Image: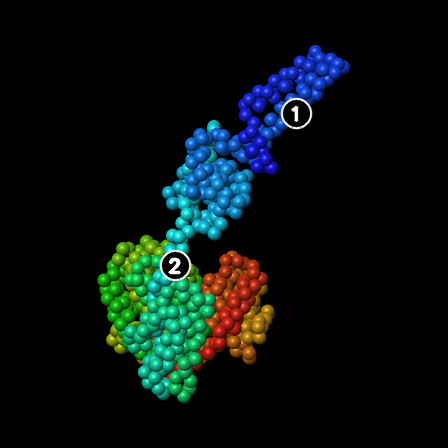
Amino acid sequence: MKKFFFKLKKLLNPTTAVCAAAGLVTIVLYLLFGNPSTKGESALFLFSIFLCLTVLGVIAVYIFSDKYTGGSFAEKVSDPTYALLTNIDQPVLVCREDGHILWINKYFYRLSGNKDITGQNTSLFFAPQPALLCDGEHFSQGVSAQLGKRSFNVRGYRMKAGEKQVCITIWQDETELANWKKKYEEDAPMLAYVVIDNLDEILRFAEGNYRTVASMIDEVMQQWAKENKGVIKEYDRDKYLFVFHASALAKMVEEKFDILDRIREVRVGENNIPVTVSIGIGNVSGDLEERAAASVSAMEIALQRGGDQAVVKSEKSVDAYGGKTKTVQKKTKVRARVVATELMDMICTSDNVLIMGHKYADFDAFGACIGISHLCAVCGVDFNIVSNLKDPNLQKCFQKAHGIPTIRKDTFIDAAEAQDRLRTNTLLIIVDVNNPQQFEAPDLAANAARIVCIDHHRKTGEFAIQPKITYIEPSASSACELVSDMLEQSVPAGTLHKDEAELMLAGIVLDTKKYEINTGTKTFGAAQYLKGEGADPGNVQQLFITNFEDYRREAGFGAKVTVYKERYAISVNENSDNDPANRVAAAKAADRLLSVEGVEASFAVVQVGDATRISGRSNGKINVQLILERMGGGGRFDAAAAELKTAVLTEALNRLKQSIDGYEEELEQSELVKAPENSKD
């Protein structure tokens, strides 16, 4: 129909229209003065009818052809312009500013498969409105579009056709350039750093020597490199550099880095202890130096998350794969001594120090803050501890802390006052948390220029500002254990106040569940050090006494408990009063559920204000951190938590079950070889 009107209109010129008008005048005169009874006049009458129909046809053609062809673009531009646009060896499309296609040239018609697309919209090819191509945000760069099997860059220009403005889009063929660009991106060299996790610690209690184990690992590594058409070389003891093409990364991701499972099959000693590795890959643009730096950063994240995983760091995200085995605890205190020295140097050169833990602080976060404050006092630098002064769970801690000589009346401040005390040379020390969303004062961290992070939870992401010191050790039982090691290595014995030691010991007792989990040589060593500094376990136990109201809150979780997939216990408190104290009750309820036979992981769900809190615990066989990370939470292998921005419990439960399903599917996709529990020697 469109072609018919367009061609017919081209046949009709102004002379035809004049003739039709003359016929109309003849009809009018005949009707007024003619006599249809005579033969001649009858013929004239029929001829007049024909002329009248012609007039109507001309009107219809012009109306409908304007509708379908946009007023005949060909008639509204000069002949040279029309000839140029028609015969140019380049696709040309003319449209209105709203994208309505008015005309295409021969080249475009041929590439589109001889299809007439006039009357349709340019959204078939690209998203922006043509008006934006002509003088908007896409004018300088154009937009990409596909036509047939070719790739084009489309640019728009305004033009007057008659009295109307139209957009002429010129299509520049960039198929060859796109192919070369794709090949360049696929062939671009990428670097991966591979580190054998804790091999020295494993070899301490397993028979065998490094070279024997390393050769077994090297054999698996070389096979993996060959499969991905890359080259891998050991550049230092238990460290490898893997060079490969960027196109191989998609294959590794699709296979979820099955090299982690293959390495885990390498066993050491008579106890068949599995070896694990960590992999860091920087998937960023730039030169090799920039890619290498990103790979080093990714490796650090993998190690800070506990090892046995691969981390791919891009400009937009950090993706982790693996991390299904428990971290083997380290026995050396060398790193604690190095970090303590660096930290004290930074404290001494600071104007003041702000110390904070995570929101809804527990004994571990509070005790670690107290330990760091002792370092500040030794250095003679003013310090403050940022906390929620109204938190009912910390009132006993506040009372005990005020018995410490170095703690002033104004030592504990809230987030608002901390902002007022933040200066250019202020040092912000964050303990027991590395997820910015869980900081006691996230805005404080965002505004601080100098940050130190000390934590035992697996790393969940990166800071907006890179910390000067990052001491994240997932194998540690608690933040208080890490700080105790630092104090032992940096201050003289007998200098800790009794209340300082007891608050820190309370943190260790809390996170180890009275030394039942996550305990190793360093854990008991830290506890022994604190007891040597005057900590009384009896006084520590007084901090854990539960009042009747807290007991009632904990009992509320026992009313509704379900078992999911035979090994996950989920407890819900549907009758909570939205009190923040329910967070602590939820954590205790999750702990208690682990004592039920057959339960390998437990979750306690409760509504707190406008959010839903989920506390997760594990007996060491299931990584609850990976489960709750899918819901925006974090923690460590056997203890984690998440807070959802919804007050609907059923929605939170559905998301929890979906997250468990996703975790189970990943386990099924690869043969998981479980690592031994932490050494308890």
Q: Secondary structure at mark 2?
A: helix
Circle 1: residue type: Leu
Which amino acid lies under the numbered mark 2 shown in the image of this protein?
A: Lys
Position in image of residue 176 (x %, y %): 40, 52
Figure quadrant of residue 137: top left
Dot 2 and dot 1 residues touching (CB under 8 Å): no
| Cα gap from disc 2 to disc 1, whole angstroms | 64 Å
Residue bearing mark 1: 53
Say which mark, if any, is on residue 527: none
Give percent across and percent down for residue 577: 54, 61
Q: Quadrant of residue 13?
A: top right
Looking at the rendered image, the disc whose residue lies closer to the viewer, 2 or 1, is 1
Instruction: Report if residue 173 is visible in the image.
Output: yes
Q: Quadrant of the C terminus?
A: bottom left
Query: Which mark sits nearer the N-terminus, 2 or 1?
Result: 1
> Which residue corresponds to the image point at 48% horizontal and 76% vertical from the top-left?
672
Helix, strand or loop for disc 1: helix
Q: Which mark is residue 183?
A: 2
The answer to whether 265 is drawn above or below residue 640 in the figure is: below
Residue closer to the observer: 142 or 147: 147
Q: Quadrant of residue 309?
A: bottom left
Q: Residue furthest front?
A: 40
Disc 2 residue crowd, few under 14, some 14–19, many 20+, Cα 10 Å:
few
Which x, y percent locates residue 350?
Answer: 25, 61
Spot the residue most to the top: 33
